[in-house]
Image (cartoon, grey):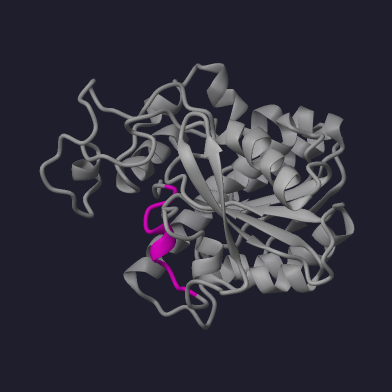
Amino acid sequence: MAPLGVSLLGTTAAHAAFSPDGMDFYVDSATMGPIKSRVFRAADGNTNRVVYALDGERARDDDNGWEINTDVAHALTAANINVVMPVGGQSSWYADWKSPSTFLGVPAGTAAVQSGSGVTQALSGGPGKSYTYKWETFLSQELPNALRDRLGFSSTRNGIFGLSMSGGSALMLAAFHPSQFAYAGSLSGALDLSLPGMRDAIRVAMVDAGGYNVDALAGPKDLTWQHLDPFQFAPKLKANGTRMFISAGSGLPASTDAITTSTIQAMGIEAVALVGTKAFQSRWSALGGGNVVYDFPAVGVHNWRNWESELGRMLPDLSANIG
């Protein structure tokens, strides 16, 4: 099984980084310190239509991958939607972890040299290593409260979407915080963490993407692990009446995808995402669930070009079901 998230953000970028239309919005997290988000205001100036755009496994600390690699912020604001792009959270799964990420009790920051090697990064410092990641708390309490108090943004009937690592995170936040999130979108997400080999694949991906230990996130039998698994918490989404958009590509490259090592990796990762997404679809059907739009394009690999296209397909439904 291809590790989910390996080379995730090394695939084809659609646009240049940083848009001057966005504003830096800092909010203090009680556990993680100051966290930056990028906020893009709706074209018509409303404050009741809000969507959160979550980043992937290799989330950077300068800007959100959606801004770095796509132009979706402008598509959303043109549709009169306010966009909130949290920055950071590498390998976090946007979850509340049980402890800081360490290996064998060795404190983070003891590596003499930092490099691109996940093994080296496992002993290096970084976000979530000297402190415990508390991203679910930040996204469901601290950030929306600050957006409400300082910008007047509504903290009810918001939308949220993510890709790969954060596809399931978007569904998790909607499942457990239904008054905040009425809409959730998963693009190439990991939607069945119970699949054979899935935890091992996530372990490898987290080591590769910053040197993180999945056991610090949650043990395999912890309730927290089930809390992160859309296959397990699907009944909550049904009970909440959450509107969803769920997609995964076939793993076949588009004609615009050059056949490189990154593309070949992206093909394998997308195939894994498709299996999990189809498993979730079967689970949803067995529950008698509706209120969901599926999209399974005939071509599409694990890259930003695919996710930007899927966002375009999701946008009309998102716009009709928030605020």
Q: Is residue 27 found left or right of 236 in the rendered image?
A: left
Can you see residue 186?
no
Q: Within the image, what quadrant is residue 172 found in?
A: top right
What is the span of residues highlighted in magenta in the rendered image?
A: 4-13
Q: Kindly identify the residue that appears in the image at 21 percent across and 36 percent down.
A: 109
Q: Position of residue 68 (x, y in %)?
A: 49, 68
Q: Is residue 42 found left or right of 259 in the rendered image?
A: right
Q: How many marks?
A: 0
Q: Is residue 303 above or below residue 127?
A: below
Q: Give the dominant element type of the magenta stretch: helix, strand or loop.
A: loop
Query: What is the residue that sits farthest to the front in this orientation?
Result: 150
Q: Is residue 31 above or below residue 38?
A: above
Q: Kindly identify the residue that appears in the image at 56 percent across and 73 percent down.
A: 19
- For this rendering, which residue is in front, 71 or 309? 71
Query: What is the residue that sits farthest to the bottom in this orientation?
Result: 256
Can you see residue 151?
yes
Magenta residue check for 64: no
Q: Kindly identify the residue that appears in the image at 44 percent across and 57 percent down.
A: 268
- For this rendering, which residue is in front, 61 or 255? 61
Q: Position of residue 186 (x, y in %)?
A: 66, 51
- For this rendering, which residue is in front, 106 or 245? 106
Q: Is residue 126 above or below residue 108?
A: below
Q: Kindly identify the residue that appears in the image at 75 percent across and 44 percent down.
A: 148
Magenta residue check for 7: yes
Q: Position of residue 258 (x, y in %)?
A: 42, 80
- For this rendering, which residue is in front, 38 or 72? 38
Q: Position of residue 9 (x, y in %)?
A: 42, 61
